[in-house]
Amino acid sequence: MEEIKSPPGVFDILPDEKSDLWRNAHFWHYVEGVIRRMAKLYGFHEIRTPLFEKTELFKRSVGEGTDIVSKEMYTFQDKGDRSLTLRPEGTAPVIRAFIEHQLAQQAPLHKLYYIAPMFRYERSQAGRYRQHHQFGVEIIGSSAPEQDAEMIDLAYSICSFLGLKNLSVVINSIGTAESRQTYRAALKDFLKSQFEQLSPDSKGRFETNPLRILDSKDPRDKEVIAKAPSILNFLDEESEAHFEIVKQCLDALEIPYQVNPFLVRGLDYYNKTVFEITSGELGAQNSIAGGGRYDGLIKSLGGPDLPSTGFAMGIERILQTMIGQNISIPPSSKSLLFLIPMGEEACKVCYKIQHDLRSQGLSVQMDYSGKKLNKAMQYANQLGVTFVAVVGDQELQSQEVELKNMATGEKLKAPLLHLGRILLVDAQSDQFLQLWNTLSKPFEDPAQTEFFLSKLSHNIKQTQHLTSSIQKAMLDILRLVQNENVD
Ligand code: HAM
């Protein structure tokens, strides 16, 4: 029978992918883990919205004239004859949910984030997929320029933490709808005189969305655009002052950036600040993250008039940049123990031990296949487990097993009954070692060292206090039990 393959433009994420490392599930866990931790550090809370929405939502927010809405949406009629669309982006669904659940009544400021798949029917090529994944944030309720800079800081800090190099942060201000109207007219006047030089695509956009011509990649358009009037000369006073503070904040945080007056972004809802982070590594599809302020969107979708700002970054593009730049990722944690039972009775005992150890939070696996010992050992090696224990009649009789450390070859005798405790100590000591490695790094600044030492001695005192309280409680219990026995 003919094999069914995945449709074009989508991909699978596999547990142990080696040829296309960016599709390795461990790499995704790592990046998503870093993103979630950073989002929490910056005070964001997760929001999850459905994979599909009413088509109208995207038409009214992203804009009918945009490529996303006019060409790229996966739209279908459901059995109730509703027009639905697989979400091509995350902002509109989050705002829809924000309005629907009246979140505005709960707090003055909302910092929401999502990690979710998006669907766009684009021409598939490296770095551009029909299902891609975004980490996105939406900050609702703040008109402060500091908030714009904070979100750029979050996007940039995630990229830096992950080790991405050769990043470029490009920012611009596209002003308010009114100031943009004046600019649009000036731009059209200019483009009219250059119309014949434009690419066919841009000629088509001249009436519907002339601002989009500004970020065309076509060399014919680029030549024309280089001479176009700058949107920054058309900003209203408020937008200009707002943009100044955004830049000052980025300067204060030492985030390198360039102002590009031709950055306009391909979605209709933006005003004032817009930004993009790109990496030279990615070729044509070089945008890692993009976003900006969208103050009027909530009101236009029937909600309260609240200012908002946000961005999204493509997780595929982050991973591809990391692989392209040979950035190493901490190895995935493997199972701690692999049990190899020899015989039926041992199999039953191991089955129960495996369950008990797992309930103590230890990752354990066992062999059910009855493979020969050396084959089972080979398999354990392949799994990358820390210890292997062979359990046969002799071990059952003595109630003692030998834990073989697969990395060092060291062998350690352990009572079957207390296997959990011994393994727990081992798992903990790894964590202690990591903590020690971090803490023992010498501090460059003596004041920092002093602060660290005083903090440490405070913690030691607290731990001593806690330990003696536990000791005292245990002695009390012991005394009680002894008294009861005497009674
Ligand atoms: P966007 O620029 O359309 O913005 O997408 C954000 C990021 O998603 C891009 O920078 C890119 O990394 C990634 N991306 C987009 N399309 C694809 C694709 N076909 N394949 C792979 N990666 C892709 C938005 O979606 C806005 N909703 C961002 C935002 C949030 N603005 C305010 N809040």
Image: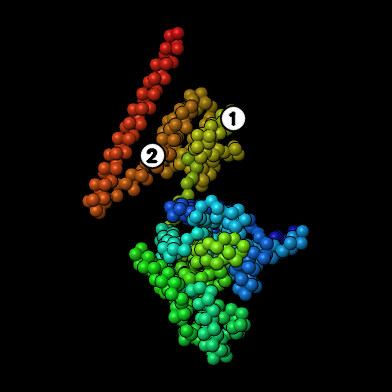
Disc marking residue 22: none
Q: Which residue is mark 1?
A: 348
Q: Residues within 10 Å of mark 1 (few under 14, many from 20)?
A: few
- Residue 222 lies, with reference to residue 312, above or below; the image says below
Q: CA distance from mark 1 to mark 2?
A: 30 Å
Q: Where is the C terminus found, in terms of image quarters?
A: top left
Q: Which disc number belongs to residue 429?
A: 2
Which is nearer the eye, 437 or 148?
148
Q: Quadrant of ligand 1?
A: bottom right
| 85 vs 12, nearest the viewer | 85
**Label 1 element class:** helix
Secondary structure category for the residue under label 2 = helix
User: Residue at point 48% right, 71% down?
Assistant: 272
The structure residue drawn at horizontal position 41% and vertical position 35%, both measured from the top left corner, is 425
Q: Hey, what amino acid is under mark 1?
A: Lys
Q: Position of residue 330 (x, y in %)?
A: 43, 52
Q: Amino acid at mark 2?
A: Ser
